[in-house]
Image (cartoon, rainbow, N blue to C red):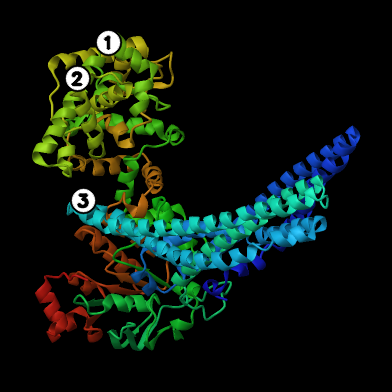
Amino acid sequence: MQVTKRSLYYWILHRHYRLQLLLLFIIVLSLFFRIIPLEMQKRIVNQAIQLKDYQLLFLYCGIYFAAVLLAGVSKYAINYLQVLIGQKILVEIRSRLYRHILRLPLQFYHSMQPGTVISAMTAELNAIGFFIGSALAVPVTAVLSYLAFFGFMFSISPLLALLSSLLYPLELLIIPRLQQRYNAWNRKRIKTIRAMSNVVNEAVSGISDVQSYNSFHLEEHRLQHYIKSLYVSLKRLFRIKYGIKFTDNLIQSFGPLLLFLVGGTLTIKGQFTLGALVAFLSAYEKIYDPWKEMLAFYQSYQDAHVRYRQIMKTFDLQPIPELMAPREKPLQHLGRVSLENVGYTLADGTQLLGGINLRIQAGEQVAVVGFSGSGKSTLALLINRLYKVTEGRILLDGCDIATLSKADISSNITMISQKPFIFSGTILDNLLYGLKHSGKDTTPLPEQKQIFQLLYDIGFAEDVLWIGINSVIPEEQVQKYRHHFLAMRKIVHLELREQFEDVIEFYDVNKFLYYASIRDNLIFGDCKDGSLKGEYLLENEYFIRLLRECDLEKDLLRLGIALARVSLDLLQENDRVLDPAFFATTPLQIDEIELYSDLITQLEFHPLQKMREKQLLLLLALRYIPAKHNVVSLSADLEKKIFLARHYFLNKIAHVDIHACHAASKKFLAGADLPGININEQDANFIAYCSIRYLYHHSLRTNILFGSVKKSDKDILKLRSVVWKAFREHGLLEEILSIGLNFNVGSQGSKLSGGQQQKLSLARGLLQKTPVLILDEATSALDNKSQAQVQSLLTTQCRGKTTVIAVIHRLDLTKHYDRIVVMKNGIIVEEGNYETLLEQQGDFYRLVRGNSNSLDG
């Protein structure tokens, strides 16, 4: 049965029988321990106290204590088992529902916001999980407890027991009516929360456009509507919720009054003992607990039921059917594709494709072209069975693809789209994503050499190499290649120094560094444990000592105040809050504007006293790079003071032998082998910017160049070819590529450019090595050189081996294909090779002549 068709209690009644039985056993056992204290109360008053028997008193008190203790232990076990059962069942519900969601038709996601799916799978299901664990335990415990306590009360006084139970029917008439109103508002609340989630998800996903168009007020207004609606819903919900509690408490408060009137009268007349009255009152208080638990359970059930039905209703669609049972191995086809009178019509009756007849031989390469809206991308989706044809059929080697399993499709057809999705993780994770789809370990993964060769072929290797070079490499990985990396540094300084002197400011202990931060100028090094980075620096004993002994704190605070004040004034004058170019000229960051604005405002009225205020200003000053952050200029006196403080720090505090470092560096950079000397004998944790040392907290690029970039990264693009050649000569190319492959791409590949994402997607698809390859404008974000590389790969290595169906956006690439299919208004209007179609001077001819070899897809 489809997961969305199952009721909430299906999971409760059909899962984890042993745990459920154990839970029921402990519940029944706990009732015994809860009744015994009531009987002991009666016996203590009527027997032990009345007879003045200490032995009986101690015995009954001991039994009372043991029963209370065992009742507490059993309650703990019941609560734990409830949670355990609930979470176990929730794991299965969540897994089954997610499996169902992933298999829903692609069209479902065109109208479904990701926020709704995320909310349903996380927060909403969590709330249901807490109910599931108590779905059997609470009602069973409450009913049995009620019956046990009522039976005990009935054994003492049938009249009082019947009178005390007369109030409950009244609650059964009022509370369900209130609960119905509560459920209605609860459904509205869930819908509002989902809508809010969608609005926030849209704003966060499109934050670049929100900031670019300055549409903050628009997005705030959109969310404000739902915030107010949620406020109204919650106000009504709590009004009804506390109304239910008020009704329950009011009715229950009449119970003791009735007992005191009737029970007191009977006791005065001698028809009821005092011990019996005490025990009866105690039992009445306890009988209210299971009744209260049942009311809370009823509310919890209604809430969980509403949530569960809302979730299941959202995803209550028929998933993509698997018409064939899964095989041990998917079918292997040759790649012959046939379309017979294929049509595709939307649910509203709009026809996108009609009467498509096309035969593609195995190994043939076919280009599909046409104006925007011609249906070429829809055709690609149909061939890959991401859309289901509404007319005709599509055959793969004579087999209707509608009858093939998804494993058969994915093992024989690979589709690479124009806008690929890049998953969180590393580049390598994304490359191998398609090969891990089965969830089994039987799928052979390609060797590293195969991956590297593919990266070379599509022009992605240079990108991965550069990513690796710009990565901070873990210390354990560095040790193996440290001498090679330092040798690369030597090459740069010996052979290429003149080429890069206008781009790189090389580290030199005897020079002030204008393209390095004040922090780097002062410390001129790093600690392996990171204690000299960021805010940790201000707590480091070495740095605190440096500020004190060199009298730098006041100077740096004045610099920090000047940087903050001038930056904020310029922002206010020019309204440049969102201008990235401005923030390249100041150490102030965009998310710190409000923080430093408040700080500067406070300084107008109060002197600088608080430690946190000083730390913020010091951090700003330490991030200041004199040559880049030109909002203020560094005075010559402060520059000299910082330079002298550096030498004081290295000599007196870090105990670095500067002369030994300078001599060893000079000798090393002149071509000698790496000197085996220790320039810092007292603290191995500190690493000075000495050219014989590897800087573990810096990127490989910084380690090779051993300096700061003077200009933008574009100015050192020429380094790429030099690095490529040098790494190849030293046999390190594959090692750096491996480092690059382990680069984390960020959320949805945010750390990669559009072109890099397409290259990654191409490599991922080509690694599949399926008989049919569909490219839906898969190279649209690539430059001409990269497109030519990809096309060369398809032409030389895939021809005759792989059936290629390419939706083309650059018409000059179509000449490389065996056949060209021209589409217009959802039908095929022309077929033929490049020369033939040009000679016909039909639609293809007009496309080529009218679009300068480029189409928008």
Q: Which mark is residue 558?
A: 2
Q: Position of residue 734 (x, y in %)?
A: 39, 46
- Neighbourhood count class around disc 1 (C-alpha, 10 Å): few under 14, some 14–19, many 20 upward: some
**Mark found first going from the N terminus, 1 or 2:** 1
Answer whether residue 365 is visible to the viewer in this image.
no
Q: Which residue is mark 1?
A: 550
- SS for callout 2: helix
Which of 571/647 is in front? 571
- SS for callout 1: loop
Q: Nearer the viewer, mark 1 or mark 2?
A: 2
Task: Give the spatial CA distance, label 1 vs label 3.
Answer: 44 Å
Q: Amino acid at mark 2?
A: Arg
Q: Amino acid at mark 1?
A: Cys
Task: Give the spatial CA distance, label 2 vs label 3.
Answer: 33 Å
Q: Which residue is mark 3?
A: 211
Q: Is residue 449 left or right of residue 619?
A: right
* Residue 413 placement: quadrant: bottom left
Which of 718/41 is in front? 41
